[in-house]
């Protein structure tokens, strides 16, 4: 599904922030990406999400060489990847419902065709009563769930989450993890970037540990 | 084992069962969803979808104000240039359409006969539409500012005038022919073709037009620069929206079209306000004198604000141009932003 081979990345003329990174994300897999702050987790996520190009090495996503993708092809591939940003990135002028529906709206789908789907998903993540509320009114946990719902609405084949429990209490973190596990069971590959050891200890999953730009995989 | 332990520890088995059922339904595309529930939900009226690019932000309102002000200034300039052009053209054509024959009194000259002959010669000249000798009363009226009322023109050695009107298509040959005929048949007559006046007025009109067009060019450049900079700032303020759209899988063309549509609306609103205000000003300027029955002096002063349909067309044109500049700038800025994100 995703394959990194000897991938390296540097910003400008600076030192390499990722070195010889080689790993794969198989279909229907679940993994944590962990490492100390500044180790390169977010950079690796950005490479996975096609918002960065490596300075060397090969990245293959859904069988396509990421270096040879045209902008429109990148957009189409990105529709098969869901991402949950650490800072949520919800649009404050759109309601929770509209934010979650955004990935379908940008695909040109009519609202009547996805209204029930979005409503159902919002109820699933516990935001059924908050769907017409603007993000500034939502709590941190609600924003997190809205961001997760937005990442899930287009039924991605891979879900990438950047510190999804970084802004929530342990109880909500457990609930969010369960949500990711449910998604994984339904067939989606999940990669959660976190440095929350307690969260990772709750589920025995593959770990990708990144340190000083180098990646080690613990199956 | 770990997963089972954690789920049990959560004490939320009922919720988990519901979540599991729900996510499976989601993964299957809700195929097994209860039809009644689905119909009820589909019938549920959701809020009208807001535009992806918000229309009521402070930045948008400020941009509309900038566009309106600059369009108004450009419109005023175009209208002023148009009005000056109209007045200058009217002056020169009025002078060019009229000429004067002077009969200077001399020893033994029958002025009345000379006037009649001059009128006859003028009317017989091709290109002349009419000729009329000013009578004594009209001549006295002309002299009134200098000599006062009650002047007996018959007893004064003042020149008498014949006003000659020319056809609109009369060329220089008309003047040449008239001058030759007068020299032959009315030797005491001299022809004043207003050439000096006409030259001076043409020169003044050309200078006024050149100044007006220079100011118009400067205002046009200032308008385009202001609108471009303000539009770029507005797009940059909405960079987070571009990024989110990009990350949720929107194609570049979709993002650009959303912004382009928004900024076209903004540009049209601002241009309509500014252009409309300029048109209203000139319209009021042209109708105020008749509303308030101003005297001729005020009428002449305010009448300078009157513009012809070409002037109104120019204001409309500059309004459309400003809206297009706004749209194109937003398009280029969004593409530049997308290149930056990539």
Image (cartoon, helix red, strand yellow):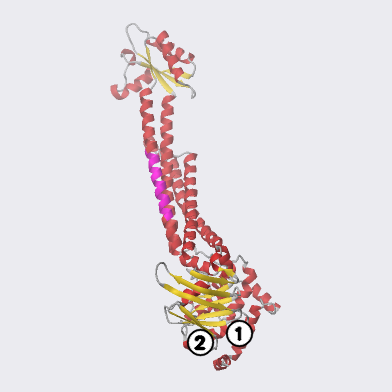
Question: Residue B259: within the magenta?
Answer: no
Q: Which segment is the magenta one?
A: B211-228
Q: Is residue B291 visible?
A: no
Q: Tag 2: Cα neighbours inside 10 Å, few (<14), some, or many (≥20)?
A: some
Side of A47 where B201 appears, left or right: left
Residue furthest to the top in view is B108
Q: Which residue is mark 1?
A: B19
Marked residue chain, label 2: A
Helix, strand or loop at mark 2: helix
Instruction: Judge by depth and name the residue closer to the eye, B185 or B232.
Output: B232
Name the residue rendered at 46%, 49% in the picture: B275
Q: Please state the horizontal and vertical placement of residue B315, each as a whole percent of the image.
A: 47, 45
Q: Please state the horizontal and vertical placement of residue B67, each as a whole percent of the image.
A: 44, 54
Marked residue chain, label 1: B
Instruction: Judge by depth and name the residue closer to the eye, A43 or B287.
Output: A43
**Magenta segment main secondary structure:** helix
Q: Please state the horizontal and vertical placement of residue A197, each as a whole percent of the image.
A: 47, 87
Name the residue rendered at 48%, 79% in the picture: A215
Question: Residue B224: within the magenta?
Answer: yes
Q: Which mark is residue A200?
A: 2
Marker count (numbered): 2
Q: CA distance from mark 1 to mark 2?
A: 21 Å
């Amino acid at each position: 599904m995703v394959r990194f081979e000897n991938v390296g990345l540097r910003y400008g003329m600076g030192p390499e922030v990722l070195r010889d990174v080689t790993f794969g994300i198989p279909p229907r897999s679940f993994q944590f990406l962990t490492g100390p702050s500044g180790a390169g987790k977010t950079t690796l996520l950005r490479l996975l999400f096609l918002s960065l190009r490596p300075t060397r090495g090969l990245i293959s996503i859904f069988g396509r060489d990421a270096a040879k993708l045209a902008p429109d092809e990148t957009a189409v591939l990105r529709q098969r990847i869901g991402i949950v940003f650490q800072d949520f990135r919800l649009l404050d002028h759109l309601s929770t419902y509209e934010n979650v529906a955004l990935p379908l709206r940008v695909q040109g789908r009519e609202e009547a065709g996805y209204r029930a789907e979005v409503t159902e998903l919002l109820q699933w993540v516990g935001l059924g009563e908050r769907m017409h509320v603007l993000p500034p009114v939502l709590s941190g946990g609600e924003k997190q769930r809205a961001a997760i719902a937005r990442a899930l609405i287009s039924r991605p084949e891979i879900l990438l989450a950047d510190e999804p429990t970084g802004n929530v209490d342990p109880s909500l973190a457990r609930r969010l993890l369960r949500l990711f596990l449910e998604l994984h069971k339904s067939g989606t590959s999940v990669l959660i970037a976190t440095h929350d050891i307690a969260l990772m200890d709750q589920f025995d999953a593959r770990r990708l540990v990144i340190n000083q730009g180098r990646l080690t995989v613990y199956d | 084992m770990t997963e089972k332990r954690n789920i049990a520890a959560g004490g939320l088995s009922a919720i988990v069962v519901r979540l599991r059922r729900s996510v499976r339904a989601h993964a299957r595309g809700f195929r097994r969803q209860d039809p009644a529930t689905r119909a009820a939900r589909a019938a549920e009226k959701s809020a009208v979808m807001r535009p992806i690019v918000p229309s009521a932000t402070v930045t948008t309102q400020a941009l509309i104000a900038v566009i309106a002000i600059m369009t108004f200034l450009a419109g005023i300039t175009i209208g002023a240039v148009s009005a000056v052009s109209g007045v200058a053209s009217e002056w020169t054509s009025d002078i060019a359409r009229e000429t004067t024959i002077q009969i200077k009194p001399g020893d033994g000259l029958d002025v009345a006969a000379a006037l009649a002959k001059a009128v006859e010669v003028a009317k017989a000249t091709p290109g002349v539409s009419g000729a009329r000798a000013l009578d004594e009363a009209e001549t006295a009226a002309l002299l009134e500012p200098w000599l006062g009322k009650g002047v007996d023109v018959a007893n004064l050695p003042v020149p008498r005038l014949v006003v000659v009107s020319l056809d609109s298509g009369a060329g220089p040959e008309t003047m040449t022919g008239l001058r030759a005929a007068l020299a032959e048949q009315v030797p005491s007559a001299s022809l004043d073709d207003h050439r000096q006046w006409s030259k001076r007025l043409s020169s003044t009109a050309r200078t006024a037009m050149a100044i007006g067009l220079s100011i118009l060019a400067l205002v046009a450049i200032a308008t385009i620069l202001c609108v471009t900079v303000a539009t770029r700032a507005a797009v940059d303020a909405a960079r987070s929206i571009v990024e989110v759209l990009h990350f949720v899988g929107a194609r570049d063309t979709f993002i650009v079209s959303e912004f382009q549509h928004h900024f076209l609306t903004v540009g049209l609103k601002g241009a309509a306000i500014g252009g409309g205000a300029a048109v209203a000003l000139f319209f009021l300027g042209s109708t105020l004198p008749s509303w308030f029955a101003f005297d001729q002096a005020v009428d002449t002063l305010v009448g300078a604000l009157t513009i012809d349909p070409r002037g109104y067309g120019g204001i409309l044109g500059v309004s459309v141009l400003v809206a297009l500049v706004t749209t194109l700038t937003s398009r280029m800025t969004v593409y530049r932003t997308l290149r930056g994100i990539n």
